[in-house]
Image (spheres, helix red, strand yellow):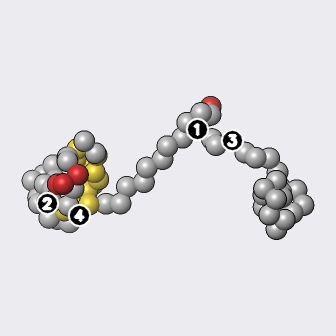
């Protein structure tokens, strides 16, 4: 089941609930019992295959623009 983030409009507390996708927009009670909440837009990051969580670099750009013309765009 997905994990959704909500913010209570009554007490301004943020909280998370694991619930079915069909219930994602249904009223969600906060830990204090208030039911006036709004679902927040969550940011999901998927980083893998590198150490330290940093994406590998293609190296410094050379003449030819941002990509260094390695793609053949010649910008």
In front: mark 4 or mark 3?
A: 3
Residue at the spot 23% in from the left edge and 52% down from the top edge:
21
Task: Classify 10 Å Cα crowding around label 2: few (below 14), some (14-19), many (20 and above).
Answer: some
Across and down, in percent, residue 46 comes to: 49, 43
User: What is the quadrant of residue 7 in the picture?
Assistant: bottom left
Can see residue 12?
Answer: no
Question: In this orientation, which residue lies closer to the viewer: 19 or 33?
Answer: 19
**Quadrant the C terminus occupies:** bottom right
Residue located beneath label 1 in the image: 53
Q: Secondary structure at mark 4?
A: strand
Q: Are marks 4 and 1 in contact (CB under 8 Å)?
A: no
**Quadrant the N terminus occupies:** top left
Q: Please state if 47 lies on the left or on the right of 23 as rendered.
A: right
Task: Calculate the distance from the C-alpha at mark 3 to the C-alpha at mark 1.
Answer: 9 Å
Residue located beneath label 3 in the image: 56
Across and down, in percent, residue 19 comes to: 20, 46
Q: Is residue 40 above or below residue 32?
A: below
């Amino acid at each position: 089941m997905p994990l959704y983030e909500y913010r209570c409009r009554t007490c301004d507390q943020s909280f998370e609930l694991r619930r079915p996708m069909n219930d994602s927009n249904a009223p969600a009670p906060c830990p204090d019992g208030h039911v006036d909440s709004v679902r927040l837009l969550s940011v999901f990051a998927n980083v893998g295959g590198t150490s330290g969580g940093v994406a590998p670099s293609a190296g410094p750009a050379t003449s030819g623009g941002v990509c260094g013309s390695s793609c053949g765009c010649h910008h």
